[in-house]
Image (tube, rainbow, N blue to C red):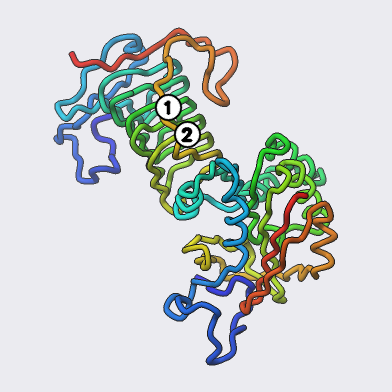
Amino acid sequence: MWDRKDSRDTKETKDTKYPYQTITEPSMENKPLSPSPDGFVNIGPSVVFKGDIQGSEDLVIEGEIEGKINLKDNSLHLGPKSRVRAEIYAKSVTIEGEVQGDVYAVERLVIKKSGRLHGNIVAPRLVLEDGARFKGTIDMEKRVEAPAISGRESGPKGAVPGNENKDKSLNLELS
Amino acid sequence: METNPSGLKGFFKKGEASEVSPAKEDPHLHRTLGLKEFMSRLAGREKPNLLDLGPARERNILYLAGRGCKVYVQDFFFELQGARRQAPPDQEFSFQGFLNDSFPYPNEIFDGVLAWDLFNYLSPKDATMLAKKLFAQMKVGGVLLAFFSSAKMIPSEPVVYRIADSHNLHYENDHDSEVKAPNFTNNEIVKMMDRFAVVNFYFLRNGVREALLAKK
């Protein structure tokens, strides 16, 4: 994982310290993750995770996530290769990959030109680059309320029925 | 990038100006007469639901949301093209089936629909089906704005319209190829939209007819 190219820094080499902690092993589920010194936690492109994610760190997702994501005071960045089927709640959200599910952004939502979102948006500010694909509704006046992350009674749109990993959760906490 | 939405290259005679002065400076900017009336009819409604059938554009969303609308975005033509491509080659594509599967909004939900020039790219039969579906999904008093070209040829795919202000639209067309325009007459449009009441037809000098229709 260390020698892969990252869109944020094309000069990255094997010797370059990757600024994010990267989750690559499913066995790390249910365990707190420490952020990098920069305060980001990264879920790498090889990760496929089904369950709920909540925490108080900024998060970068490059892999596949299905469930709910709740970062009430933090930002979420979904990289170009990310594939997310989740209800998302965060202070700010940037989408470069594919998302299916509703997005609640307390401050703002950015959909980059490579971004694809099929779901509803509640956010007071929206940046939508030309080329971005979006299908759903936009409500910029509604106040974003924090969802209850526990329980699975209201899963994301399009969530796969019979999810066998429905009790899994990932906590992002300062160590 | 093409600038003429109706596909009428050289439609404007030399020295002929568009109806709006900004177009002199920006060749992609064109007058609209229907948008202001369309928006004024939404103004009295509490948080109107508005369906935009074009691709998502930040400017349009911010313009509409800034006027209190809850905006629904569905790039109808893009999805239709995708559905056609995925259809089994040995089966006839069902437009009605596409409407049922990909257009599942409840009845009487929309206060307004921006169809842009989508109807130029549908057969009369399909256009009639879509109009019927939209009629059911619109509230009484809801309004539909649609553009029809009077040109012989139109861009091969719908123009992307970006709202500059209530009087001007910025036209985007990245496609060099053109197709034959359906050239619907007013009577054909009225017949296609037979359940709607015509609020007004606006004839623009660039060859576009803007039709503002209402559900009575």
Instruction: Name above or below for residue A89 compared with residue B177.
Output: above
Q: Is B14 in front, or is A98?
A: B14
Tell me which chain the residue with mark 1 is part of: A
Q: Position of residue A102 (x, y in %)?
A: 49, 30
Instruction: Name above or below for residue A8 compared with residue B116.
Output: above
Q: Is A120 left or right of A46, judged from the image as shown?
A: right
Q: Position of residue B210 (x, y in %)?
A: 67, 66
Q: Which mark is residue A88?
A: 1
Which amino acid type is shown beneath numbered disc 1?
Ile
Please determine if labels 1 and 2 lie on a single subunit. yes
Q: Is B46 in front, or is B17?
A: B46
For image coordinates 62% across by 83% down, the residue present is B11
Q: Is A100 in front, or is B198?
A: B198
Name the residue that disc number 2 marks.
A99
Q: Secondary structure at mark 1?
A: strand
Q: Secondary structure at mark 2?
A: strand
Identify the residue at the far bottom of this view: B14
For image coordinates 58% across by 63% down, the residue present is B159
Which amino acid type is shown beneath numbered disc 2?
Val
Q: Which mark is residue B128?
A: none
- Can residue B74 be spotted in the picture? no
- Can residue B91 be spotted in the picture? yes
Q: Is the residue under label 2 in contact with that under label 1 (CB below 8 Å)?
A: yes
For image coordinates 73% across by 44% down, the residue present is B140
Q: Residues within 10 Å of mark 1 (few under 14, many from 20)?
A: many
Q: Which quadrant would residue A136 be assigned to in this image?
A: top right
Identify the residue at the far front of this view: B44
Q: Position of residue B31 (x, y in %)?
A: 55, 72
Tell me which chain the residue with mark 2 is part of: A
